[in-house]
Amino acid sequence: MQKRNAMKWIAACAVSMGAMALLGACSEQKPSFVSIDVTGANYAKGFELTDHNGQVRHLTDFPGKIVVMFFGYTQCPDVCPTSMAELTEVKKALGKDGDKLQGLFVTVDPARDTPAMLKEYMGNFDPTFLALYTTPEKLAELAKDYKVYYKKVDGKTPTSYTMDHSAGSYVYDTQGQLRLFTRYGSGAPALTADIQLLLKEAR
């Protein structure tokens, strides 16, 4: 009787250990991102915008690349230039994989951000990054789909206004699937690590 109970206990332990090993294997397969994992989200799935060179762009234009998409405006004093500068750092930190990163800057101030201004602005960061724009009406639709907030804040003159806006970036994997939302202030090293995980996943 004792032998039978002992055998049952050993069998139960084996099943338990097997289950734990299986769960461990499953957890190892899921990457641990620093950014917010939004894999499977049913929003921000694509866009139709014009870049600073006058070319109509879609998310599908960048197959095989990690796309990082940020909403801002060229006269932003802090958040926008900091975010784009960090993205430039990320590209450099990726080394030979830097060409697999596509930075996109979507203006929330199409009234002032002309194509020429957007092109000049991108020149301050990386020549491969693209600035995108659309009409005010379509921008409102896009912002709703992307869950992005922006609002005009009047200044002392009609042209000296500022724009309050969401501070963060969407990250798409090499298949064009939305995967991450990275908060402003997370830093270049954190985003670099997340992108490296996505690239490793794609290999």
Image (tube, rainbow, N blue to C red):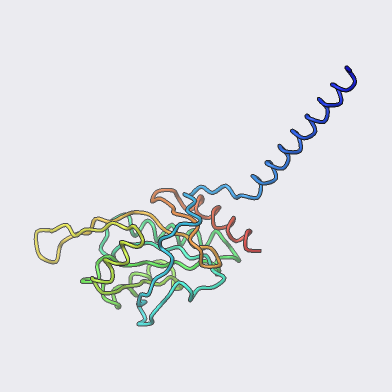
Along the line of sight, the residue nearer the viewer: 51 or 98: 51
Quarter holding residue 6: top right
Along the line of sight, the residue nearer the viewer: 72 or 59: 59
Along the line of sight, the residue nearer the viewer: 15 or 179: 15
Measured as percent of width and height from the top left, residue 158 is found at 10, 65
Q: Quadrant of the N terminus?
A: top right
Q: Is residue 58 left or right of residue 165?
A: right
Q: Is residue 17 above or below residue 95?
A: above
Measured as percent of width and height from the top left, residue 40 is found at 50, 57
Residue sitting at x 35%, y 82%: 54
Residue sitting at x 27%, y 60%: 76
Quarter holding residue 108: bottom left
Measured as percent of width and height from the top left, residue 80 is found at 33, 59
Q: Is residue 198 left or right of residue 82?
A: right
Residue sitting at x 45%, y 50%: 187
- The residue positioned farthest toward the bottom in the image shown: 54
Residue sitting at x 45%, y 57%: 41
Measured as percent of width and height from the top left, residue 149 is found at 28, 56
Quarter holding residue 130: bottom left
Q: Quadrant of the C terminus?
A: bottom right
